[in-house]
Image (spheres, rainbow, N blue to C red):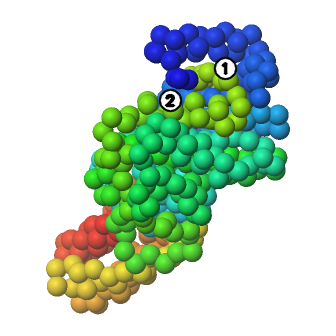
Amino acid sequence: MILRTLSRVSARTRDLNRLARHVSTLNGCFDESGKVGLILKSSSTDIFQNLALEDWIHDCVDMQRRSVLFLWRNAPVVVIGRHQNPWQECNLELLRRTGIPVARRRSGGGTVYHDLGNINMTFFSSKKKYDRMKNLGVVTGALKALRPNLDVCATERFDIVLNGCYKISGTAARLGRTAAYHHCTLLCSADRSVLSSVLKSSCTGIKSNATPSVPSPVTNLSDHDPTLTPDSLMDAIASRYNKDFDLDSPVLTVDPGSEVLMPGIHKMTSDLKNWDWVYGKTPKFSICTSFMVENTKVGLEIDIKNGFVETCVMDVPHDWLPADFVKEFCSSLTSIRYCPNEFAVAVAAFMRTTSSSPQHVQNTLRLYENIVSVM
């Protein structure tokens, strides 16, 4: 088997570090190893570090002469595709409350939930040799070799399904000028109650051209065979990768937070965490909804571009709040980020600088609370 005991894996890791010190960077390690294929395993469970490592390998390593398999897992996180709308894809209010982050990857595809019960695999190759079905064959072949009784197969959508109906793996990809990577998930023992809760939008009335996810029934492999673990599955996948690609590579553990190994990785990680990337890259969309405040119906229309409020219009009965007051309030909410913190600051500033009665203040705060509920 490819994955060794902890002590032997540590020995392999030390060998990689010694080589890194000799040739300065991970890119140099690839060249120095002389191997046409390598298997890497991340020592980090930070989604932003792992996504940054993917991009670093894609951007900085010459894939014309080699292939790379990268195995990684993450602490709880929701990951959206490059062209998706997080307000449309997940329950942001629940994520904020539970401290689960949202990450936007640089590949396309749909939204997924990761935790330590989910395995991620990234297959790197030249663009010419890019072959998603062959990569998925590594995963299905590993599963069948590990448990021959499992009924698993890849679909035309490049998902992997169990028993013909349950999705256990989804696919996304990034194709560059000369290099490409294809990454996919594998549900082993993820918390499905959290998964189903966070992948439900809390925002109503969205009109958007962003790429929507296609919901599918999912299951964990451990629900069908409790003896399966993430470690045993990564072991089997690494072994099958070596077999299918005619390699003999050990699994080398890499720290995606090492600036010494990967110059520029810290900036790449920081860029992926940036609000302007996670939320600001959302295609332009609008919110058109209504809500009841006590016995008063309020209509709300907001246009959001690059994550910022472009226009805001509210339909409020004049006897509840004067029209000029509502117009001024809406104006105070434009040109700010569409997020609760910035709305709170804007509303507080509006209330400080606007002369209003106690009832108007109370009604305005109720409006704010309802607006935030659709964020």
Determine which residue is flagged by label 2: 235
Taking the spot 52% from the left edge, 75% from the top edge, the residue there is 208
| Mark 1 crowdedness (10 Å alpha carbons): few <14, some 14-19, many ≥20 | few
Instruction: Classify residue 336 as left or right of residue 180.
Output: left
Q: Secondary structure at mark 2?
A: helix
- Closest to the camera, between mark 2 and mark 1, is 2
Q: Secondary structure at mark 1?
A: loop
Taking the spot 77% from the left edge, 33% from the top edge, the residue there is 66
Instruction: Classify residue 309 as left or right of residue 300.
Output: right
Q: Amino acid at mark 1?
A: Val
User: Residue 218, relative to residue 139: is it above or below?
Assistant: below
Residue 202, x across and y down, in percent: 34, 66
Considering the image in quadrants, where does the C terminus appear? bottom left
* C-beta proximity under 8 Å, tags 2 and 1: no
Q: Amino acid at mark 2?
A: Asp
Determine which residue is flagged by label 1: 260
User: Residue 167, relative to residue 204: is it above or below?
Assistant: above
Give how far apart the Cα atoms at labels 2 and 1 are. 28 Å
Residue 353, x across and y down, in percent: 37, 65
Taking the spot 30% from the left edge, 58% from the top edge, the residue there is 197
Return the residue found at the far front. 149
Residue 312, x across and y down, in percent: 46, 77
Q: Earlier in the sequence, mark 2 or mark 1?
A: 2
Which image quadrant for residue 372? Answer: bottom left
Residue nearest the viewer, comparing 15 with 133: 133
Instruction: Classify residue 155 as left or right of residue 162.
Output: right
| Mark 2 crowdedness (10 Å alpha carbons): few <14, some 14-19, many ≥20 | some
Residue 370 visible (yes or no): yes
Residue nearest the viewer, comparing 290 with 147: 147
Residue 367, x across and y down, in percent: 29, 73
